Amino acid sequence: YVLLDALPLTPNDKVDRKALPEPGVDALITRPYVAPQGEVETALARIWAQVLGVEQVGRHDNFFELGGHSLLAVRLVNLMQRAGLPVSLAQLFQH
């Protein structure tokens, strides 16, 4: 996120998306990578990586911070259930 005093507007009083500043490096969430531990975490990390299209997922990573959204969450829950890891969509959003 980038904190702004006001949104840049076009002459028609709409948000001028082209004038929005790019987030700096300090806006990125950074935490050290901690590898998954055990069978369940390893399976979950593999499924998350597949759904999110990322190379690796650590044990403290957050699905939504890695680019996940509600449509991908439905796919994730489906793949987890197929892998024998029963979870509901509500549980995913809560945790």
Image (spheres, rainbow, N blue to C red):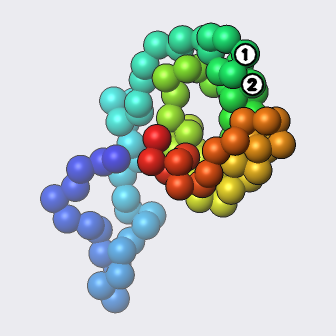
Is residue 56 visible in the rendered structure shown here? no
Element type at mark 1: helix
Q: Which mark is residue 17?
A: none
Q: Residue at x 69, y 48 (%)?
A: 77
Marker count (numbered): 2
Q: On screen, 90 above or below 17?
A: above
Q: Which residue is mark 1?
A: 39
Tags 1 and 2 in contact by the CB under 8 Å rule?
yes
Residue 55's spot in the image, x, y percent? 72, 25
- Crowd tier of the residue under label 1, counting other residues whose Cα lies within 10 Å: few below 14, some 14–19, many 20 or above: few
Q: Amino acid at mark 2?
A: Ala
Q: Which mark is residue 43?
A: 2
Residue 53's spot in the image, x, y percent? 74, 38
Q: Residue at x 43, y 67 (%)?
A: 17
Q: Amino acid at mark 1?
A: Glu
Element type at mark 2: helix
Residue 29's spot in the image, x, y percent? 41, 30
Q: Residue at x 24, y 50 (%)?
A: 3
Which residue is more in the foreground, 49 or 19? 49
